[in-house]
Image (cartoon, rainbow, N blue to C red):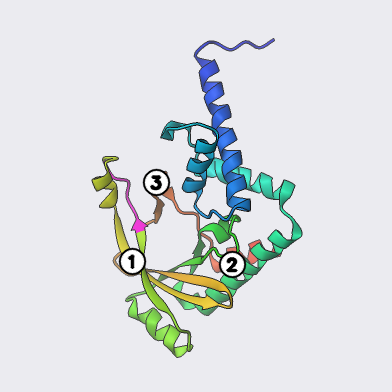
C-alpha cells in the first residue's frame, strides 16, 4: 500500500478542493449563464464554503472541466446554440478578414450562453478604419471601450492592477440576436499580447482558419 507523508496529505486535499471548485465553476459556466471564468470560480468556491485566492483553480483546469461537463451533460439544443454562435463568429470574421481577426472569449472556449457577446480582435492602423468599414456595409454600431491587459503589475495592489491596462476601442453591433464586439488593436498596441487579469496568462485566440476547423467538429 502506498503511503503519503504528512506534508503531502494537505497538498493532496488542497488539490481535491480545487478540482471540486473547478467542476462547480464549469457547471455554472455551462448551465447558469455566467460567462466569466474568474467569477464562476469565485462563486463556486463560496458555494463550497471556501474563501481565499489560494483555493481557486487555474483557467485551464476550469476549461478542462467545461469539456467534461459538455461531454456528459450538454444536450442537443446547447450544442446547436454554440454552433450558431460559432457560425456567426465565422461569418463576422470572414467579413472582417482584411483586419486579421482573432476570436476570443466564451464563444471560442465553449461555455457561451445565449446572450454572450462574440468577441473578435482586429488589427488596424487607426480605429476610424472600422467605423468607415461598418458604415460602408450599412451596419449600425455603438462605440465602447475594452480593457487591454498586456503586462503583469509588479504589485498586487489595486492601484497597480488598475494601471496595468489601457482602454482600446470596442465597436459593437448585432448580427441577428447576437452581439458582436470588435476589439481594436492599433499599430501602437497590436504587438501586445492580451492577458487575462485573473492569472496574467495570454488570452486564448483563434484565427479564421482555426474557427472553421472548430465548426467542422459540430
Q: Which residue is mark 2?
A: 209
Residue in the picture at 31% in, 63% down: 167
Please say if 114 is above or below 200: below
Please say if 99 is above or below 216: below
Q: Given contact means CB atoms under 8 Å apart, are the residues at marks 2 and 3 in contact?
A: no
Give coordinates of residue 6: x percent, y percent: 52, 11
- Single out the residue that lies furthest toward the right: 76
> Residue 117: within the magenta?
no
Q: Which residue is mark 1?
A: 168
Residue in the picture at 61% in, 56% down: 110
Comes first in the chain, label 2 or label 3: 3
Between circles 2 and 3, the one closer to the viewer is 3
Q: Given contact means CB atoms under 8 Å apart, are the residues at marks 2 and 1 in contact?
A: no
Residue in the picture at 48% in, 67% down: 120
The image quarter containing residue 182 is bottom left
Assess disc 3: are there few (<14), some (14-19) or many (≥20) residues with their C-alpha within 10 Å of its C-alpha. Answer: some
Q: Which residue is mark 3?
A: 200
Comes first in the chain, label 2 or label 1: 1
Main secondary structure type of the part rendered in magenta: loop
Marks 2/1: CA–CA distance: 25 Å
Quadrant location, the C terminus? bottom right
Magenta region, residue range: 148-154
Amino acid at each position: 500500500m502506498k503511503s503519503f507523508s504528512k506534508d503531502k496529505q494537505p497538498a493532496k486535499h488542497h488539490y481535491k478542493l480545487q478540482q471540486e471548485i473547478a467542476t462547480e465553476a464549469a457547471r455554472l459556466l455551462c448551465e447558469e449563464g455566467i460567462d466569466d471564468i474568474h467569477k464562476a470560480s469565485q462563486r463556486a468556491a463560496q458555494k463550497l464554503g471556501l474563501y481565499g485566492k489560494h483555493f481557486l483553480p487555474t483557467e485551464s483546469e476550469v476549461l478542462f472541466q467545461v469539456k467534461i461537463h459538455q461531454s456528459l451533460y450538454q444536450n442537443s439544443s446547447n450544442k446547436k446554440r454554440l454552433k450558431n454562435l460559432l457560425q456567426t463568429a465565422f461569418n463576422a470574421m470572414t467579413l472582417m478578414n482584411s483586419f486579421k481577426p482573432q476570436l476570443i472569449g466564451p464563444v471560442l472556449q465553449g461555455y457561451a450562453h445565449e446572450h454572450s457577446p462574440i468577441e473578435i480582435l482586429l488589427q488596424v492602423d487607426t480605429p476610424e478604419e472600422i467605423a468607415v468599414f461598418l458604415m460602408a456595409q450599412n451596419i449600425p454600431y455603438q462605440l465602447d471601450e475594452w480593457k487591454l491587459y498586456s503586462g503583469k503589475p509588479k504589485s498586487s495592489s489595486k492601484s497597480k492592477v488598475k494601471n496595468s491596462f489601457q482602454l482600446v476601442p470596442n465597436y459593437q453591433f448585432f448580427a441577428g440576436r447576437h452581439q458582436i464586439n470588435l476589439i481594436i488593436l492599433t499599430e501602437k498596441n497590436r504587438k501586445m499580447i492580451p492577458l487575462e487579469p485573473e492569472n496574467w496568462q495570454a488570452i486564448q485566440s483563434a484565427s479564421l482558419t482555426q474557427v472553421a476547423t472548430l465548426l467542422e467538429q459540430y
